[in-house]
Amino acid sequence: MTTYDVSLLEGDGIGPELSECVYSILVNIHDKSSNLKFNISRVEAGDNAKLKYNKPLPDETFNEIKNSQACLKSPVGESAADVVLVLRRYFNLYANVRPSKNYPNIPSFSKDVDLITVRENTEDLYLGWEFYSDDDTVISLRKISREASKRIAEHAFKIADSREGKKVTIVHKSNVLRLSDRLFIDTSREVAKEYPNIEFEQMYIDACAMELIRNPNRFDTILTTNLFGDIISDEAAQITGSIGLAPAANIGKDFAMFEPVHGAAFDIAGKNVANPTSFILALKMMFDWLGEKYKDNNLTVQSNKIEKAVDDLFIKNVKTIDIGGKLSTKEFSKRFINLLTDIGYD
Ligand code: ATP
């Protein structure tokens, strides 16, 4: 039996409902003969924590996350930047990885899409370097470095190498951002030379936004900078079905954080209608990452079971309301856990 320390950040809006689902899955996986145990530290962060402790990321939460091997993060509301950006920066979570694929029986604009966006997560306009140059003018600075570009390109090519598509599309705007995006492209090209088995193409961000709608099947692995990646991964999520199905991983050298792509969705909070699949698939990504890091095949087994359980439930039209089903968050979670931990499912 191997034990993993996992921090579970509860968040705001629909965050606590999604957390409850993922918490129950982890507890149930442990109860069945998986050879896995999870020490789950449930911590508060976000708007609710700010009201209670005057800090969106209380010290106790930060310490619990630091003491864990990986973090599962629910969506956070208005204080998202004070939580997510701080954690990304502290743990140097340089790769933001967002898979988007079609699932059975999910109404969508596309068919058989299976792509992954690999977004640089530490630079670009997200450093927030802005200032007034006079009373009516703001200047925003964009940082792109060779080191961070190389690191994210290596990450993207490694991912592409593990996938069937064996293709990387680098997305940029080098006709306007002539120095920064040229550096990003040239660095990626150098990395591409180490992977002669992988097809490599370049595309402007505006063309990519269009192609994602016109012909999403042409993409396999998209490599891009921070802001472009933020926007096109939401587009890719919507094309393949619903933002309620989209997970994201923030990966560093020694630590990683897994979360749904969407925000706190206050409009549906507390109504028991949120789709927990995004967070369930984020949990799958955590199992993949921990499984590779600690060479633990039991985690890979659980990851594959999650993928199969999602497919099987959707095939049977067991779905939440946002994707054309009838089930509440709690009902869907229960059906999912029953299927995942069903002894016959092994
Ligand atoms: P942010 O600005 O941080 O992206 P937001 O609340 O404005 O957050 P999202 O939460 O990303 O926007 O999502 C937009 C809408 O999509 C929500 O208002 C909600 O109606 C729907 N939505 C998002 N996540 C889910 C989910 N898990 N299940 C069902 N519907 C969802």
Image (cartoon, rainbow, N blue to C red):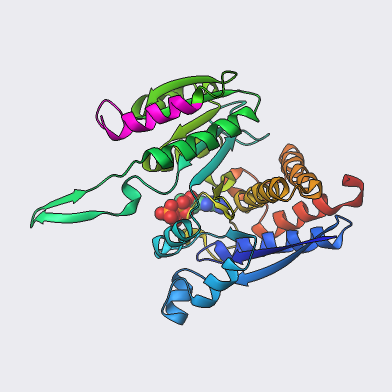
Q: Assign the magenta stretch its main secondary structure.
A: helix
Q: Which is nearer the eye, 210 or 316?
A: 210
Residue occupying image coordinates x 60% and y 43%: 323
The part of the image, by quadrant, that contains residue 30 is bottom right
Please state the horizontal and vertical placement of residue 143, each as a whole percent of the image: 31, 44
Q: Nearer the viewer, residue 85 or 114?
A: 85
Look at 42% across and 41% down and name the residue there.
147
Identified at 56% across, 44% down, the residue is: 246
Q: Quadrant of the C terminus?
A: top right
**Can see residue 330?**
yes
Front residue of 98 and 158: 158
Q: Is residue 44 visible?
A: no
Q: Is residue 141 left or right of residue 251?
A: left
Image quarter in which the N terminus is found = bottom right
Residue 27: image x %, image y %? 77, 64
Toward the bottom, the furthest residue is 53
Q: Is residue 178 magenta?
A: yes
Point out the residue furthest to the right here: 344
Q: Could you tell me residue 291's position as x and y percent?
A: 73, 48
In this picture, which residue range is highlighted in magenta?
173-191
Q: Is residue 303 depicted above or below 27 in this figure?
A: above
Q: Position of residue 79 (x, y in %)?
A: 40, 65
Q: Foreground residue, 254 or 109?
A: 254
Q: How many marks?
A: 0
Residue 332 placement, left or right of 46: right
